[in-house]
Image (cartoon, rainbow, N blue to C red):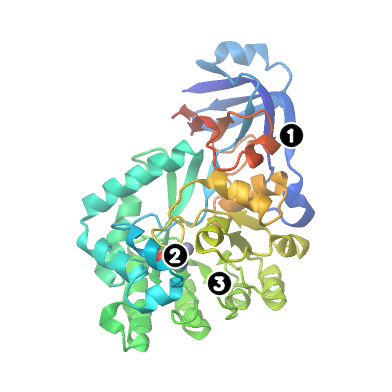
Amino acid sequence: MSKLLITNIGLLATPLGRSALAGKAQGEILKLSHAWIMTEDGVITEAGSGEPPIMEQERCFETIDAGGRLVTPGLVDAHTHLIFGGFRQHELADKLRGRTYLEILAAGGGILSTVKATRAASEAQLTAKALAALKEMLSFGVTLCEAKSGYGLSTEEELKQLRVVRNLNGTQPVELVSTFLGAHAIPPEYKDDHEGYVRLICEDMLPAVASQGLAEYCDVFCESGVFSVEESRRILSRALALGLKVKIHADEIDALGGAQLAGALGAVSAEHLIAVTDKGIKSMQKGGTIACLLPATSFYLGADYAPARKFIQAGVPVALATDYNPGSCPSLNLQLVMNLACLKDKMTPEEVLTAVTLNGAAAIGRAVSHGSIEAGKKADFVIRNAADLDYLCYRFGSNLAGTVIKGGIIC
Ligand code: IZC
Ligand code: ZN
């Protein structure tokens, strides 16, 4: 039995609950001064303010003095394209000359160049590369993340990526939730046969993924020149029928109506949403869909920022994630995402904290067990080199994660 007591917490800041918070509630977090947290066997048993119970102090094997600093829940990165071969730094010059993300993709670069590198990599090579990324993530205070496939684009190659995700779970501290994204781009073999590729996804890839239990979610890149709303509907409906939950890359560049589809299908989350319409927001609110916003991608692409305030006003829960990928967000810094969300999405520090913890956990089906500091939840939290939440949200670009604790173990 392993016990841990964190004492002398200057400020404990956490959302509370076991489901996503929306509207005004998203910004109503618990702030406890002079706080302590107690954990047992990787689970939080109690948290409070003032002096921790003496009896408990004596029964604890290990005590950490937080030195009067801020403690937050472990961060949740609910949208990453973690498993890929190579990087795409060679596209930077093109990008600086004004070529857009979709133009680079249409010319056979972009995602397709990463597909080549990923297909050429062995499972062991992909594992080693992702392991290094997870280590960096953990250093930013991320203790739970989502990981998508989507650079294989054939049944065998997609399964290969998803096996890497499975093998990484439990072999290092960050927990992973896996998402099948076979509908990420049209592979070169199907360049002139979209319909054939959609059929391959529905009739071969999805049944294989479901029967091998390799993914909890199915996602689609619903965008001009990639997958249409109708193709996305077919793929996601098939995924739902096979028992997977669904997400959608929706209305990022063009307002195709991905958000309406997300709401209509009861998708757990819709991602990006820079170009979302009022109709799309309404549909998401009705369907209980979480808006997963990715401001670091807007930053890298020089694009607009998603209308976070509109979602909050409409009662749609907002999550925030990095979108870590080699094309539009080569960064794992979720603290930078928090900074950008304040500065560019105009979210308050309290709303931002909920977005990268409890709402992020809800966007990947883990809100019952993760995403807040309260009795019964996983003992995942971070002692910050900060005195308060405002400081964490204002020191943009820094890494203020001091000590990261995952499942009651100091990392
Ligand atoms: O590799 O470009 N947006 N998919 C959709 C991505 C970015 C990943 C990439
Ligand atoms: Zn993405």
Tell me the residue at 55%/50% (across/down): 366
Q: Where is residue 325 in the image (x, y as percent from the top left)?
A: 41, 58
The residue shown at (61%, 51%) is 340
Label 1, label 3: how many angstroms apart (C-alpha)? 34 Å
- Precedes in sequence: disc 1 or disc 3: 1
Q: Which residue lies furthest to the front in this view?
A: 97
SS of the residue at dot 3?
A: strand
The quadrant where ligand 1 appears is bottom left
Instruction: Name the secondary structure under disc 2.
Output: helix
Is ligand 2 within 8 Å of the beta carbon of the residue shown at mark 1?
no
Q: Mark 1 points at which residue?
A: 31
Residue 380 location, x and y as percent? 53, 36
Report which quarter residue 267 is drawn in.
bottom right
Residue on which disc 2 sits: 96
Real-space CA distance between mark 3 and mark 2, rounded to the nearest whole angstrom: 25 Å
Q: Which badge, 3 or 2, is on the more N-terminal residue? A: 2
Pick the front one: 77 or 225: 225
Specify few, some or many for label 2: CA neighbours under 10 Å numbering under 14, 14-19, or 20 or more.
Answer: few
Q: How far apart are marks 2 and 1 (CA)?
A: 44 Å
Q: Residues within 10 Å of mark 1 (few under 14, many from 20)?
A: some
With respect to residue 275, does 124 lie above or below?
above
Mark 1 lies on a secondary structure that is strand
Percent position of residue 48, x then y: 70, 26
Residue type at mark 1: give it. Lys
Q: What residue type is labelled 2?
A: Leu
* CA neighbours of label 3 inside 10 A, class few (<14), some (14 to 19), many (20+): many
Observer able to see residue 243: no
Q: Nearer the viewer, mark 2 or mark 1?
A: 2
361 above or below 312?
above
The residue pinned by badge 3 equals 250
